[in-house]
């Protein structure tokens, strides 16, 4: 066997050894699975099962992209990263969950307009939004987030029939008041007018306030 043939034979043996090491050897298997970013209500076992990664599996046979795509089927998952550590055999699953800004049609709505099922209970203080589309719902949320805390905390529900017609039901003492905010603009002025109107003795029984044109409000 000449030098060239020996070199080829050695290369083939090295390649075969590497293939065995990565694909078949028990040395390179999943020895532990670590998760991070999970909501408190979701157990680690549920996420690991969904990823279809098992202890003892060959590291080389794990497809991070496939595991990520499987985990993204969970609607509350915004982003996920799966990585392998060849030295210690650890697989890391890092999840970023969607943050709800409102309840829309019985489900959660995040700031990007994505509708999803919450991993656990809805956080307190989330407004219930009624709108024909998630995008329109976000327009209503834009107005909601611009309102002062005292008005947000008394808000019962929020409705947007169109971008220029946003309204809310507010709990004012023992009664409910419907406030027609109009578009999500001039919010500071509208809030000042709203609070001034409620403070007037003659308005102690009002049920509707139209602030669409804050310089010419209408009460009923």
Image (tube, helix red, strand yellow):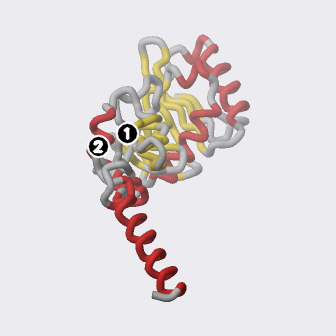
Residue sitting at the far front? 1
Question: Does residue 109 appear in this view?
Answer: yes
Q: Quadrant of residue 157?
A: top left
Q: Earlier in the sequence, mark 1 or mark 2?
A: 1
The x and y percentages for residue 217 are: 64, 33
Residue 55: which disc?
A: 2
The x and y percentages for residue 135 are: 51, 53
The Cα–Cα distance between marks 1 and 2, rounded to whole angstroms, is 7 Å
Residue 93: which disc?
A: none
Residue closest to the eye, 179 or 85: 85
Residue closest to the eye, 93 or 2: 2
Q: Residue visible at 67% across and 32% down?
A: 190
Task: Determine contact: label 1, label 2, CB under 8 Å.
Answer: yes
Residue 33: which disc?
A: 1
Question: Callout 2: helix, strand or loop?
Answer: loop
Q: Residue visible at 48% across and 30% down?
A: 178
Mark 1 surroundings: few (<14), some (14-19) or many (≥20) residues within 10 A: some
The x and y percentages for residue 110 are: 49, 43
Q: Residue visible at 46% across and 49% down?
A: 86
Q: Residue visible at 29% across and 50% down?
A: 57
Q: Is residue 148 above or below residue 146?
A: above
Question: Does residue 161 appear in this view?
Answer: no
Mark 2 surroundings: few (<14), some (14-19) or many (≥20) residues within 10 A: some
Q: Is residue 183 above or below residue 215?
A: below
């Amino acid at each position: 066997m000449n030098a060239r043939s020996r070199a080829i034979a050695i290369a083939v043996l090295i390649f075969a050894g590497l293939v065995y090491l990565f694909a078949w050897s028990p040395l390179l298997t999943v020895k532990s699975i670590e998760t991070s970013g999970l909501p408190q209500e979701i157990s680690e076992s549920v996420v690991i099962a969904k990823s279809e990664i098992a202890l003892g599996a060959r590291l080389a046979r794990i497809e991070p992209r496939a595991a990520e795509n499987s985990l993204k089927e969970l609607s509350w998952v915004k982003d996920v990263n799966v990585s392998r550590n060849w030295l210690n055999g650890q697989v890391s699953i890092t999840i970023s969950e969607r943050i709800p800004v409102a309840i829309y049609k019985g489900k959660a709505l995040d700031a990007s307009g994505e509708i999803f099922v919450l991993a656990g209970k809805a956080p307190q203080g989330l407004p219930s939004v009624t709108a024909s589309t998630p995008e329109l719902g976000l327009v209503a949320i834009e107005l909601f987030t611009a309102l002062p805390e005292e008005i947000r905390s008394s808000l019962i529900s929020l409705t947007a029939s169109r971008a220029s017609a946003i309204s809310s039901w507010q709990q004012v003492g023992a009664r409910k008041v419907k406030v027609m905010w109009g578009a999500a603009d001039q919010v500071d002025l509208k809030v000042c007018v709203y609070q001034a109107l409620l403070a007037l003795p003659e308005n102690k029984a009002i049920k509707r306030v139209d602030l669409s044109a804050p310089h010419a409000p209408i009460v009923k």
